[in-house]
Amino acid sequence: MSKSRYARQIAFHGVGVSGQEKLSASTVAVVGIGALGTVVSDVLCRAGVGCLRLVDRDYVEFTNLQRQVLFTESDAVKRSPKAVAACEYLAGVNSEIVLEPVVSEVNSGNIVQILGGVDLVLDAVDNWETRFLINEWSVKNGVTWIYSAALGSQGMTMNFCYDKSDKLKFSTESQKLPSQLSVSNRPCLRCFIPADQPQTQQQSCATAGILAMTTGTIASIQAAEAIKILTNANTIREDLLTIDVWNNRFKNIKIDRDIDCPVCVRGEYEYLLRSGGMMVQKLCGRDSIQIVPDLQAKINLELFAENLKGVGKLEVNQYILNFANEEFQFTLFQDGRAIIENAKDEIHAKSIYNEFIGLR
C-alpha cells in the first residue's frame, strides 16, 4: 500500500493509517455496475479498497452515458460488458488494487460463488428479485450489505449490518428457524418491504426518468457508509435515508424489525431456495427481455458464431456475441444468458432463444 497515494484520506481523523490498512485488506462486491454501481466503484477504487468484485449482467448502451460515469462512447459502440469496461477503466485509476469483473446474472445457483469471501456487499441493482436474494444470503451468512435505489430525483439507502456471530443456524430437519433462535434485533430488507409490494410498482427509469445527481448522491453516501463499515467507525448510520435532490429533502426513517419477518425471524429463504428452470425476465426501462437458461456453464461463443453465420449480422469477442437480423437482435453471454431486443413478448423472446441458441 502506497501511503502517499492516500495521504489526504489518511490525514482525516476517521481513517488514519490503521483505517487505510483495513481498507487495503478488504474485499467488496458491487452488484450492478450502472448509475449507482459505477459511482460507488469509482470512489472505493480511489479510496484503496484492496479488492473490488464488480458484478453485472448487462452491456453498455448510449443511454447509460448520461449517468454511468465509468463508460465511454467507445464502450457503447462495442457493447462492452459493463463489469469488464468498468474494471478496464478503474485499472487505469488504481493499479494497486485487485479488480475482478463478473459478467453474470446473480441467482440462487451462483450467489455463493459470486459473493463468497467478501467482507461487504453493495447493492446497486435495478430489480427487487436480486435485492431479496442478496438480503437472504447476507442474513444467512452474517455478511453486511448496503441497499441503495434511485428513481427520478429520489433515492434511498440503508445499511444492513451483520457479523459472523449473527449467522443463522439451520435446523437439520428443515429450512426454518424458530423465532426465539433468530439473529440480533437488526431489521432486514423484508422487514419493511414485502416481497409482493414491488410487483405493483410500474415506474422505471425509462418512464419516470433519472437524474445523474440523484444516483451520484446516493452512491456517494453508500460509499461513505462502506468505508465507515470497513474501518469499524462508530458513526455508521442505522436508519433508512431518503433523499429528493430536486425538492431539497433529506430524511432519516427509523426501521424496526418485523417480529414475524419471514427471513430474519422465521428463517424462510424463498429466493435462495428457488429451483432452476429457464427464467424469462423483462428488463427495467428497456424494450428487451432477458433469458436465463437452467445451466451453470461457460459456453464457447466462437462456436455459436460459426453456427449463426449467414443468418444475420455477427460480432463476437471474449465476453459476448451480438447477433442481428431484420426482425430482432440479441446479445449472448458466456454463461448462456441472452438479452433479446425487439421481441413481441416474452413468449416470442423464448422462441427466439430456443431457435437460435437452444440452451436449456
Image (cartoon, grey):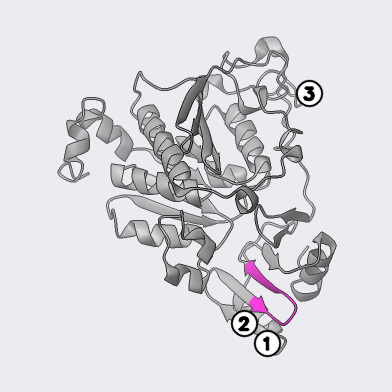
The quarter holding residue 235 reads: top left
Q: Residue furthest top?
A: 180
- Residue that badge 2 annotates: 314
Dot label at residue 270: none
- Residue that badge 3 annotates: 173
Badge 3 density bin: few <14, some 14–19, many ≥20, Cα 10 Å: few
> Percent position (x, y) of residue 190?
67, 27
Query: Looking at the rendering, in which quadrant would you find the C terminus?
Result: bottom right
The amino acid at mark 3 is Glu
In the image: residue 9, left or right of residue 72:
left
Q: Which residues are magenta?
A: 323-332
Contact check, label 3 and label 1, Cβ < 8 Å: no
Q: CA distance from mark 2 to mark 3?
A: 52 Å
The amino acid at mark 1 is Lys
Q: Is residue 147 visible?
A: no
Dot label at residue 309: 1
Q: Residue furthest bottom?
A: 310
Name above or below for residue 39 compared with residue 242: below
Contact check, label 2 and label 1, Cβ < 8 Å: yes
> Percent position (x, y) of residue 262?
73, 23
The amino acid at mark 2 is Leu
Of discs 2 and 3, which sits in the foreground? 2
Q: Does the magenta run of residues contain 201?
A: no
* Residue plotted at (65% across, 77% down): 323
Name above or below for residue 211 compared with residue 187: below
Name above or below for residue 120 compared with residue 172: below
Q: Is residue 243 visible?
A: yes
The quarter holding residue 188 reads: top right
The foreground one among 203 and 355 is 203
Nearer-N-terminus badge (2/3): 3
Nearer-N-terminus badge (3/1): 3
The foreground one among 207 and 310 is 207
